[in-house]
Image (tube, grey):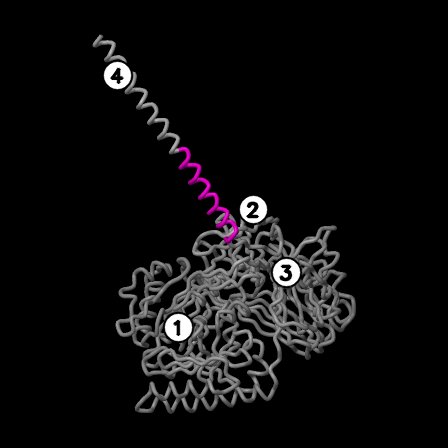
Amino acid sequence: MSCQRTQTGCRSVWCRMSIRLLLFCAVIVVAGILLANVLAAKADAWEFCRPVVNWSQPVAKLEAAAGSSSTREITFTSSKTLKNVTIRVVPALAKYVSVKPARIATVEAGVPQRLTLSVSVPRTQAPRLLVGVIQVRRQNIPVLRVLPMCLIVTKPLTSIGDASIDPDGVFVGSTTSVHVKVPYVGEETPESLSLIRVDPTNDTRTELGELHDDGTGGDSLAGDGVFEADVLLMESTEGDFPLVLKVISDGRTSYSSQLTLHVRTETPPATLLAIDQIYAEATTRYDAALRAPNVSGELNALIAWLLGRSEVDEASLQGTQVDIVFADGSVRSLLDFAPGMRGGSTAAVTDCLAPFISDFAPDDETPYIHSLMGTLPGGRVFLQNDSVDVESMKDMSTFGVVYVSTHGSTDSMGIPHILTRERSSYSKTIGKYKWDILLNRLHIVSNYYAIAPPFVLKYNARFPNSIVVVAACESAKKDWMAQAFLEKGAGSYFGYTKKVTTSFSNSTGRALFDNMIRKGMSSLAAYNALGSKEDPTTHAIFKMYGSGVRISGSVLDGSFETGSLAGWSRSGDTRIITRLGPIRPTDGKYMALLATGLGSQSGTNSELSRAFAVPAGKRRLALDYNFVTEEFPEFVGTVFNDNMRIDVLASDGTVIGSLYESVNSSSFLSVSGIDFPGGDDTCGMTGWKKGVIDVSAVASGGTIRVRVTDEGDSIYDSAALLDNIRFE
């Protein structure tokens, strides 16, 4: 009985436990359903409230050739107002595509937001298809919807060199002639080569004009492989508009890297004159403020006075520096040239530029560096004071070493300036330098013209892996100046992060070049071997960008494959071409041409020269040359004895070896397809010859000089072609 009762009790307990468990599970299920419903309701509410982005196109399709760059505009709108928005390109594409603006403080609901996609593909990139997305993120959380994007990378455009447009700015409503120029290096003459305007909003392309290589339509020399055109433009809208060159060859179409046409509204002459007068008055007030007992108060009063002028958009103070943005878009500054500070002078070595050497002496290091460079083979140029003008800054890429000792500054927008010694004037500001001022390539600082990074990019040819030192205040405060020089081919760039004293710049510059020249170090090793890189007075850091480069005096780019005459001193009619009629380069895609002016006055001389060092184990300088003349055959044996001469000179100017060709002494072959301006359509050439000069007598280095001389008249012209300069 007891046992039966016990079993019955167990069964009862088990039943009660099972019922409770079932009830508990039921409660859990019901609670889960209720919670799910609540969450679903909240999800629906969140789905209803969350912002959605709508793009101007369903997919961003981009195409770029390796080695090219381009831009495309897109827009998006948001269904809700967004704060602190960032625009992000996924990492797979971020290497090639960037977006501006990348941050937007406020995106108003329903208001279109314009974005610019910049595409840049390295020339070494193999053809491929890349896919990804662009995200709009709010507080680092993606917002629906993303924009799918694909980038098609095609083969590099090997048939087109670097294109140029001059001027690269026009005024709204004004018909302007611009000159477009591009070397063509393809094997066959293209069927057509034309200038195309690209609408970045929808990628439509409009032809603006065709380029020629037949001596017409703005082409300066027929058959030289350089296509040119004078194109009339009349724009109705302000902005920066992309242009490309379209090439059709063998039935295939390709496009060049992008040029940019800047369109601005012209400022009335009365406003320009008022701006010049306001700046002159501001200069007077600024000089007085620096001498006043209450400098700060007087400078603030100057700012207030400037902001009260309708021609002034912005005026601000950085310490004692005054920065002004005028209504025409020009930027001008007023700088205190404090004694002992690198606030505003320029000098360089080998190219050595010292525009303010008279201010910095005896603590200007450029004379020492210039003399130190003299212990090496190679030509040296030392420009001082007024010789350092705007034009001299366009030729910095001619040299392997550039040392600029000058005043410098950055404006309120962070843009760095390197001062020249050229005084600003009203006539040049609205004339010769008009577009450089408007496009912020040139600034005016204390009545001197100063170059900004876009100036370096616009005017300098490709640097031959040069070492560039800008010994000026704030020349490395931002990376912009360094990046401009490096982008144009400089190997190393040095500058200062803050204002620097002349004494520290002097000692640092001397030590750097002692390490490179006396100790034979590369620029990187020389920099690392310096003592303190910090100015103890101002705490400016001497900063290096780029890679290690050794100073060398050897001939650089003997086949001219940079497409420029970088490294050569030049005068007269000298240029780089890809062909002359049927004549092609002997090595690579480019060759140099020296002409007797192609229609200029009688007796014109053209010259190219550069210093060299003889590599170890080499005894001869060799080069390929071809003398071409229209004097053949009619005027052989007359006074019209055009000639070319190649000399190698020792350091004292002594000629140690020469090559010579002339109308009267050389043998010529008839050549068709060459028609210089003037003269007739008959032409002779020596054909490509290999010239050799023994340079063992100048093992430490010498100079090669090439001259072409016009004799008798300017009607029939002659030219020398050079290529493949080397040592054997």
Q: Quadrant of residue 545?
A: bottom left
Whether residues under marks 4 and 2 lie with C-beta atoms below 8 angstroms apart, the answer is no
- In primary-sequence order, the first of circles 3 and 2 is 2
Callout in the foreground (1, 2)? 2
- Report the amino acid beneath label 2: Leu
Callout in the foreground (4, 2)? 4
Please say whether residue 44 is one of the residues in the magenta stretch: yes
Q: Which residue is mark 3?
A: 201
Q: Is residue 672 left or right of residue 72?
A: right
Q: Secondary structure at mark 1?
A: helix
Count of numbered tags: 4
Q: Which disc is residue 9 wearing?
A: 4
Mark 3 → mark 1, Cα distance in angstroms: 52 Å
Mark 1 → mark 2, Cα distance in angstroms: 51 Å
Callout in the foreground (1, 4)? 4
Q: Which residue does the image show at 66% across and 56% down from the upper left?
A: 255
Query: Image quadrant for the N terminus?
Result: top left
Q: Which residue is mark 2?
A: 130
- Report the amino acid beneath label 4: Gly
Q: Which residue is mark 1?
A: 370
Callout in the foreground (3, 1)? 3
- In primary-sequence order, the first of circles 3 and 4 is 4
- The answer to whether 516 is drawn above or below residue 442 in the figure is above
Q: Secondary structure at mark 4?
A: helix
- Report the amino acid beneath label 1: His
Mark 1 → mark 4, Cα distance in angstroms: 112 Å
- In primary-sequence order, the first of circles 1 and 2 is 2
Instruction: Tell me where the magenta segment starts and ends, as one range.
Output: 29-50
